[in-house]
Amino acid sequence: AGLSSQGIVRVRFDGSTATEVGRIDLGVRIREIEQGPDGAIWVLEDGANGRLRRLDPD
């Protein structure tokens, strides 16, 4: 995730190689991402009107 990408990139690591395996476009700048103990992803949007969003694992 990054401020300019406006989304989350899922990456698979295999030894010293990293490969993109998915992308979630949120359409807003992301300030921070954390994973909860239940596997949910918590996303804090950037800006004065930024929201805290919960993304449930599927």
Image (tube, rainbow, N blue to C red):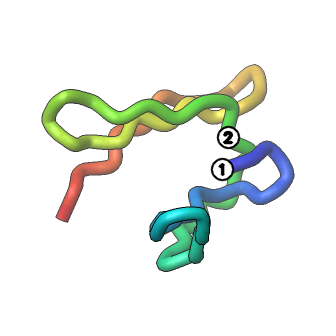
Depicted 16 relative to depicted 1: above or below: below
Tell me the quarter of the picture where residue 9 sits. bottom right
Q: Position of residue 51 (x, y in %)?
A: 54, 30
Residue pushed farthest right? 4
Tell which of 58 and 50 is nearer to you: 58
Residue carrying label 2: 30
Q: Position of residue 20 (x, y in %)?
A: 58, 75
Q: How many residues crowd mark 1 within 10 Å: few (<14), some (14–19), many (20+)?
A: some
User: Taking 54 as reference, is 21 left or right?
Assistant: right
Residue pushed farthest top? 48
- For the point 68% across and 31% down, the residue is 31
Residue carrying label 1: 1
User: Taking 14 as reference, is 57 left or right?
Assistant: left
Tell me the quarter of the picture where residue 53 sits. top left
Kindly indicate whether the residue at mark 1 contacts the one at mark 2 (C-beta within 8 angstroms): yes
Depicted 4 relative to depicted 14: above or below: above
Q: Position of residue 32 (x, y in %)?
A: 60, 30
Depicted 11 relative to depicted 49: above or below: below
Labels 2, 1: front one: 1
Amino acid type shown at disc 1:
Ala
- Count up the numbered dots: 2
Whole-Å distance between the Cαs marked 2 and 1?
A: 7 Å
Tell me the quarter of the picture where residue 47 sits. top right
User: Taking 24 as reference, is 28 left or right?
Assistant: right
- For the point 49% across and 64% down, the residue is 15
* SS at circle 2: strand
